[in-house]
Amino acid sequence: MKSVIAEAMNLKYDPVAILLTDEKPDNAVQFKEGKFGCVMSLLGAAVRGRTAVGSRATVACPGGGTGLGFGNQYENLPGGVDTFCRFLSTGNEGYEPGLQVTEMMKPFLTEEVYDSFLYGERYLKTPELVKRFVDLLPMTDVPAEYVVFKPLKNVDPEVEEPEVIVFLADIDQLAALVVLANYGRDNNESAIIPHAAGCQSIGIYPFREARSETARAVVGLVDISARVQIRRSLKDDLMSFAVPLAMFHEMEANVPGSFLERNTWRELMRLKSQST
């Protein structure tokens, strides 16, 4: 599959398709079972041309497993949801059950993640607010063994049907994607920015939108930890923009005759080229 949008916006990175399947693609990269890894590295692998997969058995990060639609994986974290609520907020230091779990997990954690378990990522002010955050997530249990990240250009539409298409865009391109998402709609809110992990913004949130009567695009990478991973992987300042397949086709069809063929967009691109 090709993307008219990617060409019209001169995207540096090809879009990535997210597919659900019970068959693991040949030569797909994945995490080793039991080894912690960030789902953003699977996305990064697909951006660089590889096919990558996540499964319930290989995605050890509870946020990642939840984000890819493998149910509420926070419940399976040692120490349960309470430990996670402190991890995302104030930390487990001083909370004896969470501290015991943290020390038990230490051999399997990076130094950075261990530090966060102790002292908290501080993305929400209190553990109670994290519990509310978890309760509000659009929990999903996908009916497939694998969630596949694949370069869109390698998708054969005759035999494969992606759930979601993910664009990685700089700030000017993100602005254009938001405009295009609303271009043929009779409302002004066809793109949303939830407070969510990077994986949730390309997984369960757009999965939910795909099931809605009028799907919306989901802007992501407002997750600071995910931004660190993408920076390490791709070295660029990017935002994600995830759209369900039907909306992707809608937006693709709206490129001809749109602002992307007019002078203001061309001038913005000219000014951008002068600053690089």
Image (spheres, helix red, strand yellow):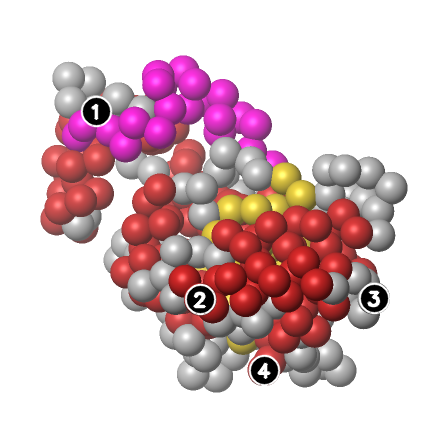
Q: Amino acid at mark 3?
A: Gly
Mark closer to the observer (4, 1)? 4
Q: Which residue is mark 2?
A: 274
Q: Secondary structure at mark 1?
A: loop
In this view of the protein, which residue sits in the foreground, 8 or 154? 8
- Cα separation, mark 3 vs mark 4, equals 27 Å
x, y percentage for residue 138?
60, 37
Where residue 87 sits, quadrant-wise, is top left
Mark 4 or mark 2, which has the lower sequence index? 4
Q: Secondary structure at mark 4?
A: helix
x, y percentage for residue 164?
64, 60
In this view of the protein, which residue sits in the foreground, 158 or 176? 176
Mark 3 or mark 2, which has the lower sequence index? 3
Q: Which residue is mark 4?
A: 154
Q: Which residue is mark 3?
A: 257
Q: Amino acid at mark 1?
A: Asn
What residue is shown at x 48% (from left), y 62% (from top)? 272
Q: Are marks 2 and 1 in contact (CB under 8 Å)?
A: no
